[in-house]
Image (spheres, grey):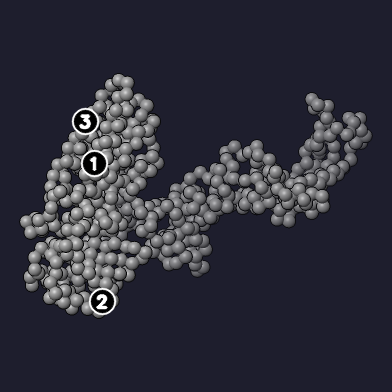
Amino acid sequence: MTTVNWERESGDKVEEFAAALILLDNPQGNRITPSRGDGGIDIQVESEGRWDIYQVKKFSSSLTASQKKQIEESWNRFITETLPKKDVRSWTLVMPWDPTREQLEWRDELTKGCGFEVHWLGRTQLDFLASGRPAVVDYFFGDGGQRITGLMEQMLALRNDFTSGQERPGLIERIVERQQQVVEALSHVDPFYRYVVEIRTGNVGALTEQHFLADANGASLVHYVQTSDEQYATIRVVPLSAESSWLRPIGGKLSLTPAPDSEHAAALKEFLDYGIRIDSMPGQLIEVTDPTGLSEAGDGLFSIVPVFEESNMPPLELQVRAPEVGVVLRLPLVDVEAANAPRGDGFSMTAKDASGTLTFSFKTRTDGDLRQETFNFRTHPCVGKYPGDVLPAIRFLSLMDGKNEVTLAIRGGRPILRPLAGENETRNQAARLIDFLEDLVLIQEHTHVVVVIPDFETLTEEERAAVGAVAKMLRGEKAEGRWNTFTTDGIDAGDPMFSEPAHITVVVEEPMSLTLEGTDIELDAWMRTVNSGIPDTHSLDEDGNLIVSIAEGTLISEMIEPPSDANAALDAGPK
């Protein structure tokens, strides 16, 4: 096993190596970027809300006055910049030199009265940590890097086998077996990543963004290789530490050159100004650093999708504020995605309401002396969704009348952006939809049948009217309508009512129900309908029943108490 000669190695490599040992033992830890450089590497590790801070220095011999000054500057920076923001449990000075009693006294004097644990992790402890991480030692000071390169070349050779088009019996199985062997070897040699290979049925070209995002979850790099017409391989490179990409970077150089004034040119500007994603843009990969060895430079279509961490965002909501009234509606937001522009101070954010009916987007940047801020709202189909889930978003849209102001705020708290006024083109449509959705919500309260929002393009006027009438009755109101016909087998066509027309009244008591998009919805209520009119014409249907048309017909329906023998059945629900 390669050993570490601390004095002979460069100071920068010693610092990175010591930091790697700590970070691999604490995978959730990460580096702190100081506001000013005084040498060394700062690492923070969180556990149950408390923080352990490590200050890594390259000094491998007795400290000089200049080196002590660097440590003192690091300590003072920690006290002023980090300590006020975090519940610190410990601070540890890390360097490949075991302290003398005098140096420990100097450290204790420096950190006196801090109120948390202070440690010195010296050469003996670093040697012990290194003994448990031989791959890390080999990578930094031995031939580990060359061994990784060799395994990458084997991976590349396997890629050539994948794409050779050969169909010899057992070829894919042998390639997959050898691939797994190389992957296992890479995972042992590469101290910063592990490799996961899956052989799947399908075609890489048919994969959706959801597939890519699922595979990218927790991975630093995902590579897809079509192994045959029916199968493809997925190779995921998973970091062993939050700082693996710093310890062993993965990256490359990409050139995007869209045609002037094209949609791609506009999309590239949005990305550069606001960090908004790029989809399928022509470009060229000039060079790439890829542990799998499978990526190649060349032309292609490239998408750049920012990685979002919603956990870093506070809970947010949209607020509608009416003049001289204040907040009249709060709409909680979920799936918050925020990105900073790669140049300048641009920023963009998107979020949705809980039902996914409304997408809110915001972008801002400084242009000269002006700060530009833009809100945008996009609606999505609500067919098939639960009416109660969608109502808050529809109410929000109905209130955007050009007078009310909209702002982004901490949920239940104060605004974090300047309020903006604007009128949404769907406001009137949203206002008309509110009554219908409220009717559906009320109907749902009285049935075991799941009620969802129907397709308004195929919904008939009769069905719309039935929803409104049933909701009226459930509110204790009377629903009025037209009585046009009735069908009966109990009246003869020669009945005097047809030769001597006069008003008739038919009273019907029955369980309340309606039909919506072919679904029969029975409610836990009863209704009485009083039908009144003058019999006009009549005819027989194919079953011999008499169909009577009514002139001047009216009907009035209202909710009534159910018969006593119906209560048990209503309470029992569906069987």
Residue at which label 3 appears: 157
Numbered circle sitting on residue 503:
none
Q: Is residue 202 left or right of residue 54?
A: right
Up-down: is 190 above or below 458?
Answer: below
Residue at which label 2 appears: 114
Comparing 109 with 451, the one in front is: 109
Which amino acid type is marked by label 2?
Cys
Rendering coords of residue 486 (x, y %): 80, 36
Rendering coords of residue 241 (x, y %): 27, 53
Nearest to N terminus: mark 2 or mark 1: 2
**At x 16% / y 62%, what residue is drawn?**
124
Picture quadrant of residue 224: top left
Q: CA distance from mark 3 to mark 2?
A: 57 Å
Q: CA distance from mark 2 to mark 1?
A: 44 Å
Q: Are marks 3 and 2 in contact (CB under 8 Å)?
A: no
**At x 58% / y 49%, what residue is drawn?**
387
Which amino acid type is marked by label 1?
Leu
Circle 2 packing at 10 Å, graded few (<14), some (14-19), many (20+), is some
Comparing 215 with 466, the one in front is: 215
Circle 1 packing at 10 Å, graded few (<14), some (14-19), many (20+), is many
Rendering coords of residue 65 (x, y %): 8, 72
**At x 65% / y 39%, what residue is drawn?**
519
Q: Given this view, does label 3 or label 1 mark the residue nearer the observer?
A: 1
Residue at which label 1 appears: 186
